[in-house]
Structures are given as C-alpha cells and as structure tokens.
Amino acid sequence: MEQDVLFAIDNSEDMEELLENQEVQTEKYLLFTSAQLLFGVSSEYVVEIITHHAITKLPLVPDYIKGIINLRGQIIPIVDTRTLLGYSGEHNECTIILNINDTLVGILIDSVLKMIDIEKDSIRIDPAQKTQGLVSGICSLPDKQTMLVFDCVQILNQP
Amino acid sequence: MSANNDSLLEAYLFETNSLLEQLDNLVLEAEEKDSFSEDDINTIFRIMHTIKGSSAMMEYNSLMTIAHRVEDLFSIIRDTSIDIVPEEKRSDLFDLLFQSIDFFRQEIDHLQNAEPLTDNIDSLLQKINTFIQQIQGKDTAEGSAEGAAQAAPETPAIPTPSVDPQFPYGLHVFFDEDCGMENLRAFMLVNEIRSFCQEDSFTFEPKGVESDPSTAAEIIEKGFLLCFVRQEDRDSAIHTVTESGFVRTYQTVDCEPVETPPAAPAETVSKAPAAQSAPQKEAPKSTAPSQDNNRHHKESLISVNLSKLDQLAAVVGEIVITESMVSSSPDLKGLKLDTFMKSARQLRKLTDELQDVSMSLRMVPVSSTFQKMHRIVRDMCKKLGKEVKLTLVGEDTEVDKTIVDSIADPIMHIVRNSMDHGIEDTEEERINAGKNPVGEIILSARHTGSEVIIEIIDDGRGVNYDAVLKKAINNGIAYPDVEYSHRDILGFLMEPGFSTNTEVTEFSGRGVGMDVVKRNVEDVGGVINITSEPGQGMTTTLKIPLTMAIMDGMEVAVGTYTFTIPIHNIRQSFKITTNDIIHDASGGEVFKCMGEFYPVVRMRDLFQMDEGVTDVQDGILMWLESGDLSYCLFVDKLCGEQQVVVKPLPSYLNTFNIKRSGIAGCTIMGDGNISIILDVANLYKP
C-alpha cells in the first residue's frame, strides 16, 4: 500500500518535470471530514485507511490520544482530530494512518470522501488562526466547497 | 571500492576488534608466566601481520606503521627466542605491547566515531624502535639478520625455481598503477589462495612479499606470478584475483618454463647465510596453525548485523502470536477437525522451535566482557601497588547481546571500586587480618531460570558502615539521629550524590557513582544488591533477565483496560475484605502481610481511570516487589499467565512521559488485542 503511494508520487513528479511548461503543478489530496469541517491531507503522508479497529486505551495521556492500535504487529498511536479541534461527541470509526517523517500516527476522523488534485498555487494561508495550528492553509475546490489543508507535522508538535 | 566501503570498514572493525581482544588476553596470560611461549609469539606475529595487512588495505597508515613495527619486533623474537629479551626487560616488553594495544583501540574508536586518526605516532614508534635496538644491541649478530629472517619464513615450503615444471599452470597478476603496498596486496592474494590450495601445490614470485617492501617495485615492474600444480586451483585463483580489489589485469601462462628472477632468493641467502637455517625449521610451524584457524573461522562463523536479528526476533514474535490466533480462532469452536488440529500442533511445535532458535542467535557468552576485567585489574594493580588475582567463574554463561553490552560498564565500575576501595592498601594489612597477601576478586555468572546472576566478590576490608553513614549524612542523603540498618546504609552507596569529589582517584570516582551503575542495571530490567561483612569483603550481585524481548507476564484487568505485570515482580496475590485494609493518618491504605505493612495502591486511582471496581472485596490485591520497593496493587481481576513479546510503545508517546509513569511497553496478546506492560519499579513512588 505504502509502496503504491510512493510510486504514484514519483511518477507524478516525473510528469510534472516533463510538463512543467504546459501545466500547473498539482498535488494529490485526500479529502475527509471531521467535526463537520472539510479537510484535505496531502497523499504524500497517507499510508492507508482503516475502519473499525479496536483501540486500546492508554492511561495518563491527554484526551486527544485515543490509545494505540495493533496494525499487523505494528503499534500505532491514534489521535482524535475532533478532540484536538475542541469538539466533542462520537465518531465514525474511521482512521487514516499517516507516515509523518517516519513516525506512524493514526488520526480518527468522521469519514473519508475522495482523492482530488489540487493546484499548489491555489492554496492560501488560513486567515483565522483558531484551529489549534492543525490547518496550514485553505483552498477553494471546483465544486465551491472550501478545503482546510491538514498540517500533518503539527500533529507531532501538539502540547 | 567506495561503493562497499562501509561494509569493508565494518568487517575491518569487527576483525580488528576481535584480534585485539585475543591479543589482550594472550598478553595478560603471558605476563603471568613472565614469558611468551613459541605459540604465543607466533600468534602475536600473525595478529600484527593481519592488522598491518588490513590496515594497509583500508589505508590507515598510523595503524599500519605501528603494527608493522610490532611485527618486526616479534619477528626478531620469533627467529631467535624469547631469551633475547632479558628478564629485566620483560616488563617493558609487556608494557609496550599494552601501549600498542591501547593505541590500536583508541584508533579503532576514532574510526568508529568517524573521527580523524591520530597523526602523531612518533612517541610510541620511538619506544618500539628503542626497544628493538635494545634487544638487538644485546645480540648484534641476530640483529643484522633481521631483514633476512623476516623474508625467510615464506621460503622454506616453496621449492627452488629449478623445479618449476612441477607448477605448469601460471597466473600473472598486475596490480593497479599507484595502488601502493603492492607486496602486501600480493601477499593477501597468497593468503586467500592458501585457504583453498595446499602450500606445496602452488608457488609465487617474488617470494619475500610478506615482509620485504622492496619486492613492491619488482611487482610493479614484472607483475606478480603465481604457479599451480593443478589447473582447478588456478581457476579458483583466477576467481579470487578477479574478486580482490586493485588488480588491473591478469594473464594465464601455461606449461612454459617459468623464468624467475633469481634475485629475491639470492638476496636472502647473501644477506644472512647464517640465519637461514634456523628460521627454516620454525617457519612451517608458524604458518600451518594460523592457516587452520583461518579456515575454521571462515566456515563456521559469520557476523550479522544486530538490527537484522532484532528484525528476525520481531517477525518470529509475530508468527508465534499469529499461530495462536489461527489455532485458537473462535470460528473453530465446536468443529471436529482432526487433520487440522494435527497440523496445528505440528505448527505450534515448529514455531516454538523457531522462537528458541531466534532467541539463541542473540545469545553471546559473557566471557568477552569478563576477560576485559583482567586488563583493568592488571593496570590497577600496577598503579596502586596492590597484588590482586581475578578469578572468573562461569564465563560461558550466555546472555542476550544487548544485555551483555549494557552490563560491561557496571561490572567494570564495580571491579574498579573493589580494587580501589575494597582490597587493602598493603600486604601487611592483609596478613594482619589473617588473609592471603594476594587479594582476590571473583567474577561469576550463572543462570537461574529466566535470570542471569552476576556476582562480583572481593575479599577486601568490606564496607565501613560508620564511615558510609557519616558521609551520607554529610551529603544530605541520610538524616542524623535516625537509626539505619546495614541494608539501608549499603543503599546509600547507590544514591545519587553519594560519590563526591573528595575521593576521586584515577580509577573510581570519575564523577560516575554507583547510582549510575544502579540505573544502568535497572535499565535492562535488572536488580543490584550489595552485601558486605566488615573485614571480609563485599559482594555485589546483579540479577539480570536473560532477554528483554520475551518475558512471562500476568494479565490483569481494570475495567476495560488490560495490563501485564512481569511475573518476576509478583510475590503473591490476595483476596481480601474491607477489614484487612488499615487506614493510616494521611488517609492512605495499608495492608499487613507476614508481619510487615505495605502500602495499597489502587490501579484505578493511580492511572486516573474512571472504570474498575472500588470495593476491595470485588477485586484482588497483588503484592509486587521490585528491588527494595514493595507494595500492593489493587486490580479488578487476574486473567491468566502468558508469555509475552515485549514491544516498545510508539516513540510519539514518549513526549507524554509515559515511561516514567510506570508503563514499560506493550504486548500483543493471542487475540490481537494490546496489553500494557507495567513497570513495577516506576509505577509507585512511596
């Protein structure tokens, strides 16, 4: 799975170099929702999407750490995005496993929508800095919706 | 070469390290006898030779130069006898060797840390040279024969050029231009060939490649000629030649009467006609055993990167878990599957075996760590003017590699302490105390089930309880007016801040106290314990788990959480009633057991969980112990005993200081769920 993603990126980069003059640079984003917000995470980080995985709770950790899961022998911590964003309530049991600088982290979200190509230039800086630093930019989609760019690296730097 | 430079360097470091270790032991043993046996001399010569050769290959000049000079020195000793070194010079010889070994070690350290090598080797070189001159000055006739004597060992087994038709298959090798050290490179080829070809079924030209640098020029000019009796040997040799670096080209030469420059042998003869006959007799002895050793090593030992073994152990751990997931799958309930069950049993047997094997791969004997202590004892004896004998017991005991590495420093520190503070300063003191004038330190290792027990016993003056207590009070660790037991006082020795600067000597007290030793031992899940009888000495006992990767654990539940408690920490478990709990003044709960009182720790409160039983009658009390710490943990229920594979928690969680709060790691249970392993020593702080 991870391999596939990597290949895809390699190819797209090659393509980009070839077609640099004709086309604008694009990047693949995975769209998902959490607490009624539409997020996009760069496919570079995405390892896989799992559903309904049993989470083992950990004591003495902040609320937003839901616990750890056993993904084929690997122990992966799970971060709840909804709690991080300051919302409460139940989730659909959908988890995106991210590889952020060689650290595997799962983020608990509401639901995964689709993959889309986004022009790199169309991403703007988020004007309202209220989202706990989880959003690194903002971007309008062709279907008039607005996507918040999920800042993966910030997950590692949470207090 | 640059492409596989890393693996070359790794191989070089590994080889040189093991050679140095061998050398260290050999010299220590020899020093005890105050003489070198013929075998010793040959071995040292061979070791130096190998170091020289491989250092030259790696272009580490400082190492090569020193190895070369030590080799020269031993070549002289070998060709005459150890008697060339007068009795009174022997200790200088040993010191010189130890200095050289230290130098090599230091350079190897530099290499390992990717630091530049020492350039300034003049003083050591000077010492060796002076020594060579001294022993040569004593016997000038032998001295002048040096050059020839070095060349001689290679000649005897090889027939003279006149019998060349016996070697009809020639191989002419040319080395890269400017590759340097052509003679040594040629010799390494010869060494390689010896590993598959018998000494008398091949010959090479020029002869003195091993020790005569002047042959380098000859090789550059005319190439290096190898001749074989059989064609197969030559074919394998071609293989060797093409594999080795620095070979520019080679050429086969068939059935031609080989023209050999008679210069090399003639030179040897003319230089030292007298010395020729003597070394000839000795040389076959020296080359034969070394060859045997090499061949043996090549076949039976390989070095494997530790990370690969870790990976293997991890995968095997997964297989074991998956196996039990498959064979105890709930889907199989109620089905009568004879063949399946038979195969499943077979699979379980095999996975168990696989697990044992993968564990045993990581096991190494403690002997290498123990052997190092010889050197420390020796050096400290010299420095402190004490006479101490080190006895090793059970050096063959095998322990996990990571554990061996992590206990080397603690053991060294304890031995140093014993040498420095334990053993009496003077012989008279020992004789007056009715002891053998020679002090003794015993280092022993033995297995007990899942632990290895290492004891460091000295027969010195033991711990002076009053002095230790006084110092502890001075340093603010202990309170005056409080009465402490001997056990408490020994505990102060391992408190941080006990070791102070007032007592710094060259060896102990380099700012590293027993507290660091204690921490190191505890880091690998071990326990340290000191006992001492004043006047009789001190015994330090380290109890260390055989491996950190697998352990026996007890599964306990608190609400929906599952925790694993290491079995070796569990003393007992009790079903109790409310009346058994005694409340102390500060509202804490205490449980009385076997005449002692232990604090009761509720898991639920400790980890601030909002589930789990609160009524003591519904749960169970576990009496846990780790080191000196002992307490009772209250949990909901016991779920059963299980062998678990310890996995570290994701590094991401380290930011929450989870390790310090008593969680050692986690493990995957048979059903795929995760259980958290508790660290009994850190779970509760009184």
Image (cartoon, grey):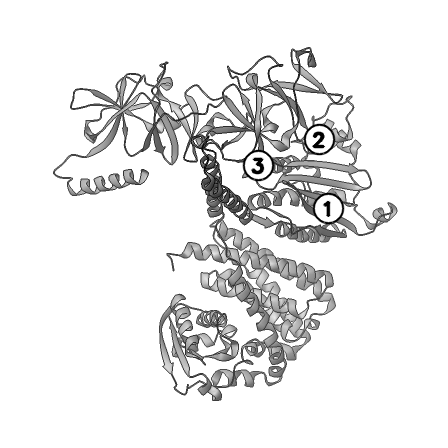
Query: Mark 1 or mark 3, which has the lower sequence index?
Result: 1
Q: Which mark is residue B381?
A: none
**Relative to B557, B330 lies left or right:** left
Mark 2 touches mark 1? (CB < 8 Å):
no
In the depicted structure, whether residue B394 falls above or below residue B266 = above
Q: Amino acid at mark 1?
A: Met
Residue at which label 2 appears: B492
- Give above or below for B139 relative to B560: below
Tell me which label, 2 or 1, sits earlier in the chain.
1
Q: Are marks 2 and 3 in contact (CB under 8 Å)?
A: no
* Quadrant of res B685: top right
Could you tell me which secondary element the residue under label 3 belongs to? Answer: strand
At label 2, the amino acid type is Phe
Residue B551, which numbered label?
3
Identify the mark at residue B419; answer none if there is no mark. Answer: 1
In the picture, measured across the screen, residue B198 lies left or right of residue B410, that is left
> Looking at the image, how many numbered discs can be counted on the residues?
3
Q: Quadrant of residue A3?
A: top left
Q: Amino acid at mark 3?
A: Met
As rendered, which of B364 and B442 lies closer to the eye? B364
Image quadrant holding the C terminus of chain A, namely top left
